[in-house]
Amino acid sequence: MKKLSQTLTVALYPVCPDKGVFLRWKNQLGGIDGWFFGGKKSTRMDTESIATVVSHDGRKERSTGKVAREFWTVRCGGLTVDQAEAKRQLYQSPQVQMWNPDGSFTDVEVVAGSFTIINESEKKRLVTLEILLPKPNALVR
């Protein structure tokens, strides 16, 4: 066994590839776990009304504004059974965050009922879940 006589410094760069999403979450022991979901990502948008106006006779209701909510479905495949089962903590976590290219993290919400583990083969699993991004802030854009 090789013995080291001095400190070895390893540079870690907070860079994720363009394709994929890195999520981190609080685990059941109070620590932080993370995983890079490098599979295919798909997105969908839903809108919700933020204000409505009712006509003077009370019969017609009209929306005066809407906000779009963005959902991402993220995937990671080729996981062992234990790795896939460990990702269940992400679904149960009180805080899930997504890494941004500038190095910051954004709080996201895991959509209820979206976490699935699919058998790819006898020993490999595919994990899929849907996250809800925060409402867009017009002051930041």
Image (cartoon, rainbow, N blue to C red):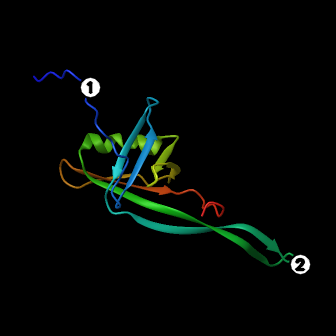
How far across and down, in percent of the image, does residue 90 sit? Answer: 43, 43
* Quadrant location of the N terminus in the rendered image: top left
**Residues packed near mark 1 inside 10 Å, few (<14), some (14 to 19) or many (20 plus):** few
Which residue appears farthest toward the front when viewing the image?
Answer: 6
Decide if residue 63 is on the left or right side of residue 1. Answer: right
Residue sitting at x 75%, y 73%? 64
Q: Which mark is residue 70?
A: none
Residue type beneath disc 2 = Asp
Residue sitting at x 46%, y 50%? 98
Along the line of sight, which residue is nearer the eye, 109 or 92? 109
Query: Could you tell which of marks 1 and 2 lies nearer the N-terminus?
Result: 1
Which residue appears farthest toward the right when viewing the image?
Answer: 56
For label 2, the SS is loop
Q: Which residue is mark 1?
A: 7
Decide if residue 27 is on the left or right side of residue 52. Answer: left
Residue sitting at x 48%, y 68%? 44
Tag in front: 1 or 2: 1
Q: Which residue is mark 2?
A: 57
Q: CA distance from mark 1 to mark 2?
A: 78 Å
Decide if residue 123 is on the left or right side of residue 28. Answer: left
- Say if 45 sits above or below 127 in the image: below
For label 1, the SS is loop
